[in-house]
Image (tube, rainbow, N blue to C red):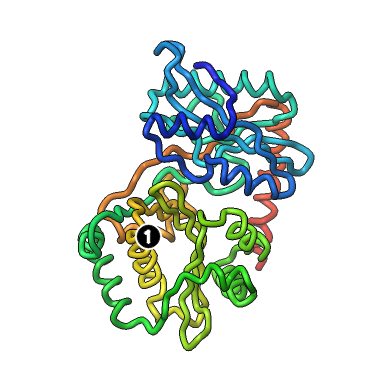
């Protein structure tokens, strides 16, 4: 495999020539957004050529340099993007070529974080974040009845019940959220406290909507004028992704998620979008996500297997130390949890 660094516009044009629908995280729009986040720098847009196929481009990848806690790594969100699923040998050849290319061009990179289809000897579970190897992709083509017909029976039942009984009014409120995100953030904080996670700072959601512009939107559900739930959806090409979602604790009987998702699906359909990725479900690879399965899997009859995030150490001693530190932190967290 041969790695070639090119301008982002060139990479996107080559991807288009190959008929690839790039995830937004592999585009210049995303790189520009990340460039304004402290500690993140677009590192390079790369073409992957197969030397055994006369230098034919077989994949593309965009990498962001992440500087954190005194070390640096490169991350490719949902990348590389292959023209067709590689064999295990092709993927290993790509990994070897990428490692060599990065070492030649930036000696300070501790590890790479990319999506791989296979387990390789030099591939490790990620130190942070929660990657997934399976997702739900909703087909948005056709009429409303067509979209509903492709759901599981319980999905159609739940959505129709929500449309009949939910008191929520659903609207695209991107402009209102950008003007003042306070009421929306209160719902995210409520959700985080209920479900046991730490919400991102309010500025993260505002920045995402601001920097991605037409490629991001927020739908809100209001009951009696108050925001009871919202979701941020990203778009690129003909695809959309269900990025963030939250719901107020006192809104649990209002069937908001089902009504909000159908509203978004029909809105996206009317604009010509053809796919809606619900962004990850749980399985043996990602057991912590299994709580999402009951809700997400009802919107399509089949799930979609995808390449999953893995780390590839470049500085092995440093990576071993980071792994050990993570293990210690995890044990301390577990002890604190049992003491409660």
**Residue lying farthest bottom?**
224
Q: Residue at x 65, y 38 (%)?
A: 42
Figure disc tally:
1
Q: Position of residue 226 (x, y in %)?
A: 52, 84
The quadrant of the image that shows the C terminus is bottom right
Q: Is residue 206 visible?
A: yes
Estimate how packed mark 1 is, as few (under 14), some (14 to 19) or many (20 or more) residues with alpha carbons within 10 Å. many
Residue at the disc numbered 1: 268
Q: Position of residue 331 (x, y in %)?
A: 66, 50
Which of the 4 image quadrants contains residue 242?
bottom left
Q: Is residue 312 above or below residue 171?
A: above
Q: Is residue 209 left or right of residue 87?
A: right
Element carrying mark 1: helix
Q: Position of residue 272 (x, y in %)?
A: 34, 54
Q: Is residue 35 above or below residue 223?
A: above
Residues 28 and 227: in front is: 28
Which of the 4 image quadrants contains residue 73?
top right
Q: Is residue 266 above or below residue 259?
A: above
Q: Is residue 36 left or right of residue 52?
A: right
Q: Residue at x 60, y 22 (%)?
A: 99
Residues 281 and 3: in front is: 3
Q: Residue at x 49, y 66 (%)?
A: 231
Which of the 4 image quadrants contains residue 203?
bottom right
Q: Is residue 281 visible?
A: no
Q: Residue at x 52, y 77 (%)?
A: 248
Residues 127 and 299: in front is: 299
Q: Position of residue 100 (x, y in %)?
A: 62, 18
**Residue lying farthest right?**
70
């Amino acid at each position: 495999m041969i790695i070639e660094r090119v301008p982002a516009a060139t990479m996107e044009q080559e991807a288009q020539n190959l008929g690839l629908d790039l995830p937004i995280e592999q585009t210049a729009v995303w790189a520009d957004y990340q460039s304004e986040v402290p500690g993140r720098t677009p590192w390079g847009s790369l073409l992957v050529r197969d030397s055994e196929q006369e230098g034919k481009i077989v994949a593309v990848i965009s990498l962001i340099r992440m500087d954190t806690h005194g070390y640096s790594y490169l991350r490719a969100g949902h990348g590389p993007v292959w023209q067709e699923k590689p064999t295990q040998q092709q993927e290993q050849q790509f990994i070897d070529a990428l490692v060599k290319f990065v070492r030649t061009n930036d000696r300070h990179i501790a590890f790479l974080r990319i999506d791989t289809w296979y387990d390789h000897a030099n591939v490790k579970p990620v130190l942070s974040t929660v990657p997934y190897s399976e997702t739900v992709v909703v087909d948005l083509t056709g009429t409303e009845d067509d979209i509903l017909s492709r759901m599981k029976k319980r999905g159609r039942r739940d959505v129709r019940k929500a449309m009949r009984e939910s008191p929520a009014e659903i609207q695209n409120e991107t402009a209102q959220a950008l003007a003042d995100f306070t009421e929306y953030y209160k719902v995210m904080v409520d959700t985080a406290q209920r479900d046991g996670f730490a919400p991102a700072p309010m500025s993260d959601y505002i920045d995402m909507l601001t920097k991605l512009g037409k490629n991001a939107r927020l739908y809100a559900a209001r009951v009696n004028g108050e925001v009871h739930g919202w979701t941020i959806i990203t778009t690129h090409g003909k695809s959309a992704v269900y990025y963030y979602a939250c719901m107020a604790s006192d809104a649990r009987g209002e069937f908001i998620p089902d009504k909000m998702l159908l509203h978004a699906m029909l809105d996206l359909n009317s604009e010509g979008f053809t796919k809606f990725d619900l962004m990850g479900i749980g399985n043996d690879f990602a057991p912590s996500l299994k709580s999402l399965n009951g809700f997400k899997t009802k919107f399509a009859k089949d799930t979609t297997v995808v390449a999953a995030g893995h780390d590839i150490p470049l500085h092995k001693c440093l990576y071993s130390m980071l792994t050990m530190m993570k293990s210690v932190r995890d044990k301390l967290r577990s002890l604190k949890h049992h003491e409660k």
